[in-house]
Amino acid sequence: MISFLLNNKMTNIDQARADLTLLEYLREQQKLTGTKEGCASGDCGACTVVLAEVVKDDDQTTRSLEYRAINSCVTFLSALHGKQLITVEHLPEGKVLHPVQQSLVEHHGSQCGFCTPGFIMSMFALYQKAQQPDREAVIQALSGNLCRCTGYRPIIDATLSACQNKEPDKFQQTQAQTITRLDDINKQGISTTNLLVPTTREELAAAKSTYPTANVYAGSTDLALQVTQQLKTFDKLIALGEVPELNQLVEQPLGLLIGAALPLGKIETSLLKHFPQLSELLWRFAATPIRNQASLGGNVANASPIGDMPPALLALNAIIHVDDGHQKRTIAASEFFLDYRKTALKPSEWIEAIFIPYTGSTNLLRAYKVSKRYEDDISAVCAVFNAQIIDGKVHSVHCGFGGVAAIPATVSALNSQLVGQTWSSKETFELGNTILKQAFSPLDDVRASKTYRISMLSNLWKRFWLETNQNAQKIETRVVHIPSANEEVGHA
């Protein structure tokens, strides 16, 4: 049985389709139609809802509720157990609007209203955070919500106004009672007929053994697309989100150990603390509601040649920890991807965690993503470079690329041929450029042509080399004065 709070109502689900999404459950079974269906792929935000779960604060003793905005269209029911699912209908108190709703009214942030519930829920999740957000934090929180007619300025203004002038709402006032209710739920076991939710590695091994053809998933943001976009059905699914080993996050002396089922949103702080150069790649990976559900392990396990994080793991010499319930082993990221959508995992295995070694002060790390949209889009080309430079000489160059081969790929020749070269010399740049131009033979597709992808690899290598040689290779800029409308322009 999956148990949770639906708004403020205790709810149990014993029998349900394995591939039933939260959106379908809310609209068709609960008749909570404030949550809308737009793209059914996690791109537009019309389906956004909020999950509240009990977490320990930084002192590891105090507990509070963490609120996360997620896309209900690409989330399966297993995500609900032991949490509170909050929909837009539950925000007002009687006829009194929630502060974020009232602010949107006062700032004229809604016209047709179709997208409004999704924006409201993202605003609500931000409202529950302790920090007072600035404009950039607001934009990040609202990312993934598309407005068709109003325009984003009044929506951003409404969010800033509400979140910078917070007052305790009914959720904060009843937090202690909600935590107690969720604690009671989490003491219960989880069992359903079609949607298997193991809570130990032994249970997970048994589920995979009993149902060897059943798909396993953590966040479901990729697997659910096969249901919503391709209209596939799944009789049995195995959810990984309740296995403790898959939810660890440990800052070890030599590197960061990240549980495979942890949502990207939960690893952002630790990941960017040690690898701040990955910030743009991580934020452009997907919008906030997707990052709050999608996992690093899932991005690795699906072995997509256009996945954004595998190139970073290749460049950082990450180690994949795998398990089958009986025996654990490790696989270097460089040996994990074998062929298109094929990995080194055995049928009985799953990814337990990913270990990423820390880089040192002599490492130059950069990550680049080229896509048609700035965020929430698939890469045409992704490139990550990690060069260790000691006394001006190349000690090592590790790299990872997406979008240019059938698998996330590295180029070992870049390391073997550049070691010992002077990093700032143009000869080093030219040698690396030649290697990369010859390394791949990409396909033409709707995102980019073969020629474009090869040119982009060359350009990104040049960008990396220039950015890390700014003292030796200064880029001159020239300021050109453009007369304003009030200035007289002379004629020669």
Image (spheres, rainbow, N blue to C red):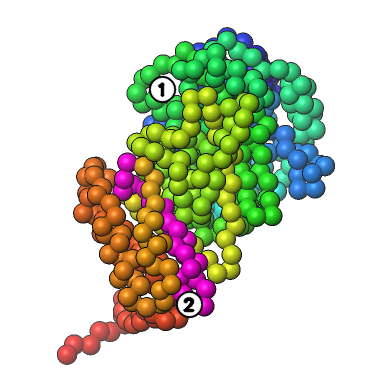
- Spatial distance from mark 2 to mark 1, Cα to Cα? 53 Å
Position of the N terminus by quadrant: top right
Side (left or right) of 110 relative to 446: right
Q: Tell me residue 338's x, y (percent).
A: 39, 38
Label 1, secondary structure: give it: helix
The amino acid at mark 2 is Gly
The residue nearer to you, when weighing 304 against 140, is 304
Mark 2 residue element:
loop
Outermost residue toward the right in this view: 61
Question: Earlier along the polypeptide chain: callout 2 or callout 1?
Answer: 1
- Image coordinates of residue 127 in percent, x first then y, are 64, 44
Determine which quarter of the picture holds residue 430.
bottom left
Residue located at (53% from left, 66% from top):
363
Magenta residues span 382-406
Tell whether position 393 is magenta.
Answer: yes
Residue farthest bottom in this picture: 492
Q: Residue at position x 36%, y 20% from top? A: 231
- Residue at 36% x, 26% y is 229
Select label 2 or label 1 by which is in front.
2
According to the picture, the residue beneath numbered tag 2 turns out to be 392
Along the viewing direction, whichever of 15 and 315 lies nearer the viewer:
315
